[in-house]
Image: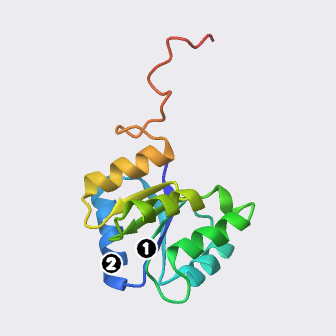
Amino acid sequence: MAYNILIVDDSSPMRAVIRKTIEISGFSVGGCFDAANGLEALEILKNNWVDLVLTDYNMPEMNGLELIEEMKKSELLAAIDIVVITSEGSELMVQQFLEKGASGYIQKPFTPEDIRKKLNDIIGETENGLGSTEGNDKDLDF
């Protein structure tokens, strides 16, 4: 299954790096949207189906933590998995992301393997792209 993702970062080159790293990682991407801050991200989310949001923390107008808070206020948006990708590495900051509702955290710099593993863990896919119950049908009764 291919997933629609939204990359939120105030740096256009960093959005391109994240997009390319996801492509290289082999993670299955359908559509890919991008926004320069949380306000732009919310506009994109109003008009597009997104399965996963990857957001930076430090951005003008609305940072990543504020974006998470706004998404969690909406019944529809609250169900979307959010991964914070940032250079902020303090345990306190990571804890804040998770407490506000982030599904995971990736610290910059990262590798394609880091991205694939984290996204597959969050989406519930195994390394071979099959769901966690695939290939284990010995208990199924047809």
Which mark, by number, is residue 56?
A: 1
Q: How many marks?
A: 2
Instruction: Locate residue 105: give its quadrant.
Output: bottom left
Q: Amino acid at mark 1?
A: Asp
Q: Residue at x 39, y 66 (%)?
A: 85
Which is more toward the observer, 124 or 3? 124
Whether residue 4 is visible: no
Relative to residue 96, is residue 116 drawn left or right? left
Q: Give the image location of residue 49, x and y in percent.
A: 62, 64
As drawn, the residue found furthest toward the front would be 92
Q: In the depicted view, which residue is nearer to us: 137 or 70?
A: 70
Q: At 68% from the left edge and 74% from the top edge, which residue is drawn?
A: 46
Q: Which residue is mark 2?
A: 14
Q: Residue furthest bottom?
A: 61
What residue type is disc 2 on?
Met
Residue 141 x, y percent position in the rendering: 62, 10
Instruction: Name the image quarter holding residue 99.
Output: bottom right
